[in-house]
Image (cartoon, rainbow, N blue to C red):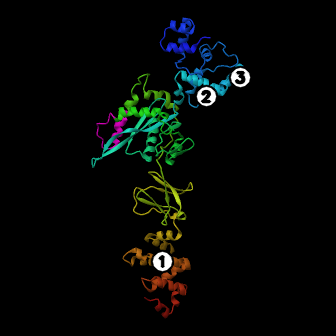
Amino acid sequence: MVNYREIIRLKSLNHSNVSVARSCGSSRNTVAEVWQLAQDKHIIWPIPDALTNKDIEQLFYPGRSINKSRKLPDFEYIYNELAKPGVTLSLLWAEYCEQCTQEHTIPYQHTQFNEKYHAYAASKKATLRIKRKPGELMEVDWAGDTLTVFDQASGEPIKAYVFVACLPCSLYSYAEAFPDMKSNHWIEAHVHAYCFFEGVTRILVPDNLKTGVIKNTRIELVLNRSYHEMAEYYQTAIIPARPVTPKDKPNAEGTVGVIETWIVAALRNRKFFSFEELNRAICEKLQEFNEKPFQKKKGSRLTAFEEEEKSFLMPLPAFSYETAIWSKATIQPDYLITVGDCKYSVPYEFIGKEVELRTTQKSIEVFFHNNRIASHVRRAYSPDPVYVPEHMPENHRKYLAYNTDSFLEWGGNVGSFTLLVMKNFLYMHKVEQQGYKSCASLMKLADRYSMERLEKACERALSYTPSPSLKNISTILKNGQDKVAAGTLSEYSRASYTI
């Protein structure tokens, strides 16, 4: 049998056809033909041991029956199909078995099928092709070098950290500067990257920084809750690189290095006085970077993205994700939580309980055992606590309901005489709040005796004096004088209510 492996090895060392023929015991024409077929099939030395001379002969000459019992897979077809989204070796093996059944041939078992394909792929140095399916991965990282933004008022320098995202298939990249690497800016950077790419990849590959990954071991992966929530919103899966293994995201690492030259180093001598100004400059450099032609193939990152990858990205949601920060708090006796410079109420039944807070720029949500118990529209500043009446005990709710407008409205609903008494209680003091207690007590008399009797008692009291006291009205109701006609009152009774 022709020693195909040895011919390819010697020819890769630039030996002549004559010397290779003498060494392998084959003719010069055979050597020339084998070397030409190897170049056509893109088979490069070294060739893995699993790809035997028989396999190579079947690959070069499919018509020759080397193994009557088993059909050799079409590795070139498999290689091209694996580049398509969702296609796996298991699926192709199943299709290969079905084809063998139709042709009445015996297929290789799944393990041998995988081994032979990987050997073929390794001979072409194309094993990474499987990992670069369009629209499948987005690798992210922070650049090691920083830029500087100067404070407009004080002139103090502020470090600017550059976030980098890369799509491995097309190498299309995104970059943006932030004042720190905290969780809110980390998630905001991902949201902006998805908007820039106009789509979402199926897998997200970050590093193991604490703002994204809390724990990553061989048996356990614990993600930051806000980061995981963002991934759920965009329906993508987070698969962090292994700790201390930058080769798990080589494209992001490589792109970071190139961006540090093309963007960070290029802007090193320019002064920026705001992050908006800095990011505009980064955007200009980023466009130049993505449009720069490849050195070893046609096109650029931009053309490769538009032609090969953009259509495979998952669509963006209708609205961008709103960055949320999770935290914990224990409810105090005043049943208030503090977020920023404001205080917000929660149901008083949860006093002493530990709850979880989900905070965004627009809203605040409170969860207890994964059940939402309160929500508020977030305020930039409020000097007074933000209360929801339903969160308060009954007595607290009544107390907060005590105000001039509510007392006057209640008095008007009872009757004109009760309204006059309410006004007298409120306006007879220097401060209206001093009369709140008398107004509240008058409302309690209505609960005890009914509103109709209170209205008549107020009418009776006002007939005696323009400024009746709460005691006058209470005495009238207690003695039943509101039920007696005005003309039948004795002079003694009338005098006893005169002030």
Residue depicted at 55% across the width and 64% down the height: 349
Give the x, y percent position of residue 210: 47, 46
If you read the primary sequence from the N terminus, does the residue marked by circle 1 or circle 2 appear first? 2
Which labelled disc corresponds to residue 101?
Answer: 3
- Residue highlighted by disc 1: 418
Number of dots carrying numbers: 3
- Name the residue type under label 2: Leu
- In the depicted view, which residue is nearer to us: 156 or 359? 156
What span is in magenta? 265-285
Q: Is residue 135 magenta?
A: no
Q: Under tag 2, what secondary structure?
A: helix
- Name the residue type under label 1: Thr
Mark nearer the viewer, 2 or 3: 2
Give the x, y percent position of residue 170: 47, 29
- Residue highlighted by disc 2: 89
Give the alpha-carbon distance from disc 1 to disc 2, as whole Å.
87 Å
- Name the residue type under label 3: Thr
If you read the primary sequence from the N terminus, does the residue marked by circle 2 or circle 3 appear first? 2
Which quarter of the image is occupied by the C terminus?
bottom left
Q: Under tag 1, what secondary structure?
A: helix
Residue depicted at 48% across the width and 73% down the height: 412
Residue 315 in view, yes or no: no
Q: Quadrant of residue 99?
A: top right
- In the depicted view, which residue is nearer to us: 475 or 275? 275
